[in-house]
Amino acid sequence: MTGVARAIVGGALIALGGATAMGQAPQVALFDFTSPDAATAWQAVNDGVMGGLSDGRFRITERRTLEFFGTLSLENDGGFASVRSRPRALGLKSGDTLVARVRGDGREYQLNLYTAARTRAFSYRAPVVTRAGEWVEVAVPLDRFVATSFGRTLRNAGPVEAGSITSVGFLLAEKTPGPFALEVEWIRVRAGL
């Protein structure tokens, strides 16, 4: 496609304006926010679990999107806010790519994957760079997610096992306090070729 801005950031393909490349496998919905009970599948987890004061919340908008918003605080050794799906089998397979359509505020968020085997402060992460007020599609192959614990990269953890992924989420852990907002239209899966 011509005239579509694309960038690769930390292994994630970002397509501005929401255009997708032609000739790719079809995408299957993993999460959208169109059902009346869409909010029940999600939860906020913030640094209050370790004494921090960040206030991260979410809601389903009248546009049928998930809005993750609040205020990031660095007080009391805090500094993160997150929203994630409640654990369930997601049916992901090796070679899959996660694709999310988001509109942010110019901050860098993290797209997180959680597994059933490891829970406390452990996730696989990939950056989601936003442009203030612009919709972007972020596509991240599962093998590009990096294992982390308490925000630190784990070099010897190995790649995520697709079948073990039970939850997907977004995290803000920049060292810049203040208000934030990220809107998510959907999260899809593109099967590996």
Image (cartoon, rainbow, N blue to C red):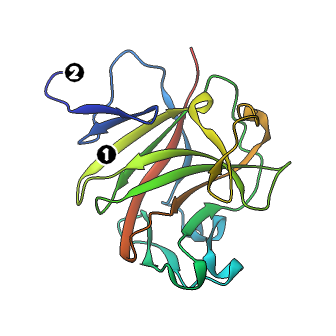
Tag 2 residue: 1
Residue 4 is left or right of residue 62, and the answer is left
Depth check, front residue: 108 or 40: 108
149 shown above or below 155:
below
Q: Which mark is residue 127?
A: none
What x and y, as percent, mark residue 66? 46, 64
Quadrant of res 176 = bottom left
Label 2 to label 1, Cα distance in Å? 15 Å
Depth check, front residue: 103 or 128: 128
Residue at position x 41%, y 40% in the image? 138
Amino acid identity at mark 1: Val
Q: The residue tagged with tag 1: helix, strand or loop?
A: strand
Residue at position x 44%, y 67% in the image? 175
Q: The residue tagged with tag 2: helix, strand or loop?
A: loop
What x and y, as percent, mark residue 9? 38, 36
Q: Earlier in the sequence, mark 2 or mark 1?
A: 2
Tag 1 residue: 136
What x and y, as percent, mark residue 50? 70, 78
Quadrant of res 1 = top left
Residue at position x 29%, y 63% in the image? 105
Residue at position x 62%, y 76% in the image? 47
141 shown above or below 110:
above
45 shown above or below 91:
below
Residue 112 is left or right of residue 73, and the answer is right
Depth check, front residue: 28 or 5: 5
